Image (spheres, helix red, strand yellow):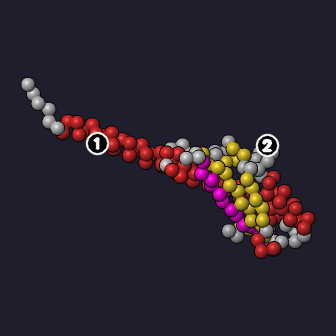
Amino acid sequence: MKYRSRKDGFVLIVTCIVLVILLGLAGLGIDIGRMYVIQSELQAFADAAALNAALRLDGTEHGITRARQAASELAAGPHAMKWDLGSQPINDITVTFPQSNLQSVRVFASAPAPLIFLRALPAGKLGFSTVAVSSVAAKTAEGARLIQ
């Protein structure tokens, strides 16, 4: 009768442990990569919205109203900018005017990024992580330009 060594079962246990670790790292990479893509899409929207709003500023209260509308225009309509690879509308948009300056505008956009694999971690129990970006544009004599 042939006896099996104790090492035969060890390979199976180590393989299972390493597989769980590798799957966890792959899931972490997927979720973090997805959040970077969403952040990039929101940043592109915030930059475009801030520039669009800055073009409408003219130093008056009417210009501020037009700037607020201009920032929201890019998130509405048939050719609206969207996030999550162009599938989700951007709804959380805030337009402010820093330091009471009527020649610059800050656009803040955020979205709840759905988590797939990071839900297993204590911080991801809700299944969402908010991704937020902002952009500042100013109107100058040469036109609108991004500041931040």
What's the residue type where badge 2 is placed? Pro
Identify the image quadrant of residue 79: top right
- Does dot 1 land on a helix, a strand or a loop? helix
Mark 2, residue position: 78
Q: Within 10 Å of the Cα at label 2, are there few (<14), some (14-19), or many (20+) other Cα atoms? A: few
Mark 1, residue position: 14
- Frontmost residue, 41 versus 5: 5
Residue 37 in sight from this viewpoint: no
Q: Magenta span covers which residues?
A: 128-140
Q: In the image, what residue occupies the spot 88% across and 65% down?
A: 63
- Residue 123 in the figure: left or right of residue 130: left
Q: In the image, what residue occupies the spot 24% across and 39% down?
A: 11
- Please tell me whether the stretch drawn in magenta is mainly helix, strand or loop: strand
What's the residue type where badge 1 is placed? Val
- Residue 119 in the figure: left or right of residue 92: left
The quadrant in which the C terminus is found is: bottom right
Q: Is residue 108 above or below residue 114?
A: below
Q: Position of residue 39 (x, y in %)?
A: 62, 55
Q: Is residue 139 above or below residue 127?
A: below
Name the residue furthest left.
1
Q: Position of residue 57 (x, y in %)?
A: 85, 67
Q: Is residue 38 above or below residue 141?
A: above
- The CA distance from mark 1 to mark 2 is 54 Å
- Frontmost residue, 44 versus 133: 133
- Residue 53 in the figure: left or right of residue 41: right
Number of residue marks: 2
Q: In the image, what residue occupies the spot 20% across and 36% down?
A: 8
Question: Which badge, 1 or 2, comes first in the chain's sequence?
Answer: 1
